[in-house]
Image (cartoon, helix red, strand yellow):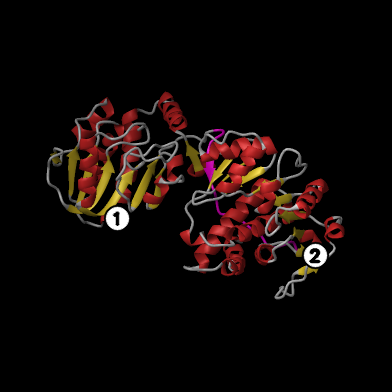
Amino acid sequence: MPQHRASVPRQVLTVAQMRAAEEALIATGTSVEALMDVAGRGAGEYVRRIAAGRPVTVLCGPGNNGGDGYVIARHLQEHGTPVTVIAARDPGTDAARNARGLFTGTVLGPDAAVHGEVFVDCLFGSGLTRALPDDLLALLQRLAAAHHFRITVDLPSGVESDSGRPLNEGLPNWDVTVALGAWKHAHFAMPAAAAMGHLRLVDIGVAAVPGAAAVLDKPAFRAPPADSHKYRRGLLAIVAGEMPGAPLLSAEAALRAGAGYVRLLADWRPDGVPPELVCAEDVATGIADERIAALLVGPGLGRGQTARARLSAVVSRGLPTVIDADALMLLGPDLPLRAACVLTPHEGEMAALERAFGLSGAALRRDRAGVLARASGAVVLLKGPDSLIAAPDGSVTLAPRASSWLAVAGSGDVLAGMIASRLAMHGDAVRAAQEGLWLHGEAARLAGPAFTALDLARATRLAVRAAIA
């Protein structure tokens, strides 16, 4: 959880947290106008660089987000960028009125017919909780359509900050979103996140907020110590079941994600096993090996009696464990977790876990994951286009948007192998989940378009190299 100034650029705040953080700054003697000037000039500099001399149109609403827009326009004017302001409504706050009074350029009414190169949305910011009125929605749509490049400031107008829910249909898509002060949950939550383009952040000096969510950060890996050996780097055992493909994909990723030794425990011997993957056909004896540092169970496990028995045996070992895929459909409070564990459900598996643990499932994704983490005692990585990690202590990590090519069969098996490999190295469930999720996104970036799960697994080594400090 963010606790110091260095973590501020990673924190993600709710509307209430952001409001309290701004009030804390004001209480120290910083005025609203001064904060608006810092925010507006920071956003204005992004706009200026993007515009590169092209004409800019700024749409200003009645509140302080509109005030930011007037500051942006003033900054552009001072630096020689042609700028026109459209006032959707007259300023309704003292700070916004002050900002408008300081701007000496052209301000047009909402009926003005404006076409141009760059459009900047400063209609409403993160406090919006109701749909845009029809006239303002039409104005926003018209101006967005009339410009070649679109930038929105803080949040796209018409989006609910805490949930990422669009409050209107037909909202524009954006090329760049410039967040002010801190990231908001909508920047990382679907469906809004898909429409925001590239994300940028203007720091206005807010302090770290205890308990705030954080954005997934690039890990800093180091080479193993000079006296390392394969067991010291971590022995990972992957407990397989009925289907060979999924655990083999997990193993391909795990072999490249850092663990010193990966062993597949299965009662079959498939063709095409990588020579560096050790296979053992006595599953019960294999699970009992005292040298195992971590276990992975679920990919290809099946859901019959044998699968249930193997999951029970894995949980009973009390070792750091990643529980994925089929095993998630078999897990419940009757199998209490006694070690550092990571659960990796997608939405369907999440719903099954909520039923098994008697949870309602009626909340935002991050809250649902947090409730399951507390109920199970495990770290929960809720997968999807807006993946996130929730820990039993209440901490939440949100992943930036990754490649949509990850929507391919076997991608989750690769992710499980990455996490389990990292878990075998150090035994920290939260850290392993964060490292694995970052590696997954980076491997997808490096693999390029239209990759298979095997391509993704084989890109893991390159992703690890990218994270070596």
- Image position, residue 252 (x, y; %): 66, 67
Residue beneath disc 1: 50
Residue 4 appearing in the image: no
Q: Is residue 127 left or right of residue 215?
A: left
Give the Cα distance between marks 2 and 1.
59 Å
Q: Is residue 228 left or right of residue 26?
A: right
Foreground of the two, 75 or 21: 21
- Image position, residue 36 (x, y; %): 32, 35
User: Which numbered mark, 2 or 1, is in the foreground of this view?
Assistant: 2
Foreground of the two, 373 or 469: 373
Residue 221 within the magenta-colored segment of the rendering:
yes
Q: Secondary structure at mark 2?
A: loop
Residue beneath disc 2: 267
Residue pictured at 57% horizontal, 55% vertical:
438
Bounds of the magenta span?
210-226
Kind of residue sitting beneath label 2: Asp
Q: Secondary structure at mark 1?
A: helix
Prevailing secondary structure of the magenta residues: loop
Q: Which mark is residue 42?
A: none
Residue 387 within the magenta-colored segment of the rendering:
no
Q: Quadrant of the C terminus?
A: bottom right
